[in-house]
Image (cartoon, grey):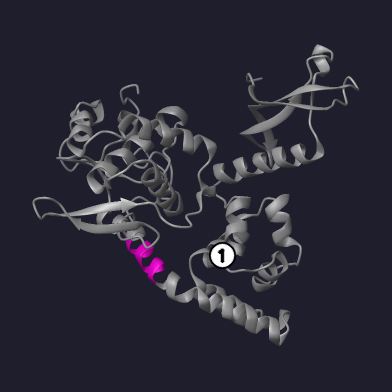
Amino acid sequence: MEASTLIRKIHMNCPLCEKTHEIEERKRHTTITLKGDTVTYEERFYFCANADEDENEFETGSMTNENLLHARNAYRVKHKLLTSDEIVAIRENYGLSQVDLARLLGWGEATISRYESKAIQDEAYDTMLRLIKDNPLQALEFLKKNASKFSEAKRQDIRAKIVEKMDTYGKEYLTRQAFEGEYAGFEEPSDSNGFVMLNIDKIEAAISYIAERVSNLFKVKLMKMLWYVDALSYKKSGYAMTGMVYRHNDLGALPVGHYSLMNLENLNVHEEESYNYDSMLHIYPSQNMNYSILTSEDKEILDNVINKFKNYKAKEIVDYMHEERAYRETRSGDIIPFSIAKDIRSF
C-alpha cells in the first residue's frame, strides 16, 4: 500500500484506544475494484499512534462516504463519464433541484440524487446529461417532452430559468462548436492528444487558473505554458490534461485551433496594443470560473509550470522550448507526439 501523507493533527475521541488525544488525519492513493475495473483514487483516514499496528487506522462515516465518492469519480474519469461534481454543476447552472432535473430528463425522481452521491451513471444517461450541459435549447426540448411531470407553475418557472441561459449559452455554444470542429480529425485517444479527448471545460479552467497567478499573461506565453502543462501531465501519469494537439511552430508548440481557442466565451481575453502598435491578446482570470473540474493532481501540475515560467518573458520561454527534444526532433507543421513531449527537461 502506498505511503500516506499527513494532512493535519486534531484532538478527538479515538474509537480505537477509547481515549481523547491527538489523532493524525492522513491521505494516500489506493485502489479499488468497481464494476470489474481497478481504479486508483485518493482516500483520507485517521491514524492512532496508540493502537496496535494492525489496527491503527479508522474512518468516520462521512469520511468513508467521501472516499467512496472519490473512487467512483476516479472510475468516471477513467471511463470518460461526467463526475458527480460535474453533474451538480449542470443542475446548479440551471437553478434546478435534484428532483427537477430528474423529471426534466424523464428519469426517476431519485436518479440525480444517486448520481451525485452514490451510483455511477451508464453511458446512455451520461449522454443525456451532456446534451443539456452546454445547450439550453436541448434542455428546453426535454422540458417540452416531459411537461406533464410538472405543474404549470413549476414548468413556467423552469422554462424561465432555461431561457435565462439562452443568450449566454448561445455565444458559448457557437464558440465551443468552432473549437471542437478543429479537432474533427482527432476523435480517438492517441499519441497526438496524449490519450485524452478534448476537454474544453478543463482548458478554460486551466487558462483562468494560470491567469490568476501570472501577471501580464499574453497569448504566446500562454500557449507554451499549456504545452508544458500537458507534457508534464503526460510525463507523470501517461495522460495529458486538456486533450489538445500541438504543432511545431516557429514560436514553439502551438495548439491546433488556437485562434478558435482564444474566442471561447468563458475566457477573459482582451485585444490590446503593444508599444509598437501591434495587437496582442491579453488573458485575464475569468470571473466565476468553476475550478472543480481541476483535480488536485491537475492543480499541482499547473502550479509547477506556473512557478517555473511565471517570470519568463515570451521570448525566454520560446527560447527555452526550442531546446526541448520534442521541438528539436520535429519539423515546422508537424504534430508533436506526447511520446517525445514527455521527455521535457526537469523543472
Q: Nearer the viewer, residue 79 or 157?
A: 157
Question: Would residue 148 be found to the left or right of residue 333 on screen?
Answer: right
Residue 257, above or below 23: below
The chief SS type of the magenta part is: helix
Q: Position of residue 337 (x, y in %)?
A: 30, 35
Residue 50, above or below 225: above
Q: Quadrant of residue 172?
A: bottom left
Q: Quadrant of the C terminus?
A: top left
Amino acid at circle 1? Asn
Which residue does the image show at 58% across and 80% down from the upper left? 160
- The residue positioned farthest toward the bottom in the image shown: 152
Q: Position of residue 158 (x, y in %)?
A: 63, 77
Q: Quadrant of residue 264?
A: bottom left
Question: Would residue 176 be found to the left or right of residue 129 on screen?
Answer: left
- The residue positioned farthest toward the right in the image shown: 18
Q: Position of residue 236 (x, y in %)?
A: 45, 28
The part of the chain drawn in magenta is: 171-178
Question: Would residue 177 be found to the left or right of residue 160 on screen?
Answer: left
Q: Quadrant of the N terminus?
A: top right
Which residue does the image show at 69% across and 42% down from the upper left? 35
Q: Nearer the viewer, residue 75 or 151?
A: 151
Q: Position of residue 48 (x, y in %)?
A: 79, 19
Q: Nearer the viewer, residue 305 or 100?
A: 305
Mark 1: secondary structure = helix
Which residue does the image show at 43% across and 71% down from the upper left? 168
**Mark 1 neighbour class, 10 Å CA radius: few under 14, some 14 to 19, many 20 or more:** some
**Which residue carries the number 1 mark?**
93
Q: Nearer the viewer, residue 247 or 122?
A: 247
The answer to whether residue 141 is magenta is no
Which residue does the image show at 31% across and 23% down from the upper left? 345
